[in-house]
Amino acid sequence: MEENTTYKPFAYQENYIPAEGETVFYNTEQTLTKIKNDCAAGIPSSVTLTAQANKFVSNESVDKANEQAESWLKTNSQAYANNSGTCFIDTIPPSSVILSASNITLNSVVLSWTEATDNIAVVGYDIFIDDTFLASVSNTVFSHTIDELLPSTAYSFYVKAKDAAGNPGSSNVLTVTTLPLKLTLKAARSVIFEKKDSSWNLCKNAASAELQHTNNNVIGGGKNAQDFYLNRYRGVIDTSSITTKPKTAKIKFKFAENTVGNALTFNLFGANIQIPVNQNFQLADWNDWDSSTFINSVSVPVNSTAENQISLNSSQLDLLLSQAAFNFFLISNGDKGNVEPSTNNRPTLSITPATGEVYLECEF
């Protein structure tokens, strides 16, 4: 950078009189542009200094005359720019941008925004999370990946475009909720208890079952030509991996087939007697579902093999923490009430390991 000295104008050559026989060459117009460099604040302007034609003379060539003009420009242009330039105070912010989100995961999100414009130039973008500055990117970058977020958490983002004077633009405030952390726990052990009797009440209120099926046979209630039959599903889910209370939890299940074709309501109950994960079921365990711990019910449509879910409430979520295992029953609506099933109005549904495994899904 040239020394910031006082501008020294050149002497005009109009009165130059060549000697007899002397060959004289004059310069052509030359220019040099400099940016004012002594602004304490604001944006400096650029100034062009001109060496007018025919102001420098040489006996050798036009090039030599031009060299004199160029040397004079280099010596004086910075001082000239500082003396005659201005410090422009930019108070106009960049335009607003539109912020959007994509690729939302458990702990990350990709933010994207439209390009801002400015009366002079956009120099970059500042990214904010929950009103806290997060990062800056250049004026050619229009997306940024935010990671190390918490699952199932709402965050507010906005982006500010900025110019060289520090004027901030703005964007919409975008609230993004990260995906929940899901923990899926299949029933560690489960059986379907089976009871048959010629009396519906004796069948429903029996002290124990006659058979238990560990390969998931049929579930529900019905009546054949001779007997009523009743099956109950009992499961135990190992919850030792749950160390914090879930935000939500659901028991999910689906049936392989509905062998009769009628709709059926299933009721989810907690167990009156807890069975440890490593303890085998006994036939007497079929009747220890606890009517005081009814969780919820779900209606399975005709011939449906879609997944069903029953949500646990807040107090039931506490059970997932306080016990090493979660014991539950799925029983049919005829089992819960006093309506005797006939051949067709109380169907039996088949549940198999391939499509019918019951499991607990927790979101944190």
Image (cartoon, rainbow, N blue to C red):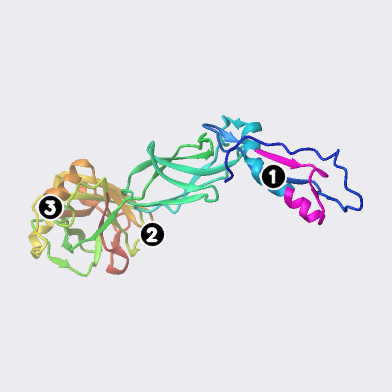
Q: Are marks 2 and 3 in contact (CB under 8 Å)?
A: no
- Depth check: 205 or 257 in front? 257
Q: Nearer the viewer, mark 2 or mark 3?
A: 2
- Is residue 246 at least partly visible in the picture? yes
Sequence-first tag of 2 and 3: 3
Q: Nearer the viewer, mark 2 or mark 1?
A: 1
Sequence-first tag of 1 and 3: 1
Rendered location of residue 53, percent (x, y): 82, 44
Residue 303, numbered label? 2
Q: Residues within 10 Å of mark 2 (few under 14, many from 20)?
A: some
The amino acid marked with disc number 1 is: Leu
Label 3: which secondary element: loop
Magenta-tinted stretch: 45-68
The amino acid marked with disc number 2 is: Asn
Residue 60 shown in magenta: yes
Q: How crowded is mark 1: few (under 14 residues within 10 Å), some or many (20 or more)?
A: many
- Is residue 222 at least partly visible in the picture? no
Q: Which of marks 1 and 3 is in front?
A: 1
Rendered location of residue 297, percent (x, y): 27, 47
Residue 205, numbered label? 3
Q: Residue at x 71, y 40 (%)?
A: 49
Sequence-first tag of 2 and 1: 1
Q: Which residue is labeled 1 in the image?
A: 73
The amino acid marked with disc number 3 is: Asn
- Depth check: 204 or 115 in front? 115
Residue that extends furthest to the right in the rendered view of this protein: 20
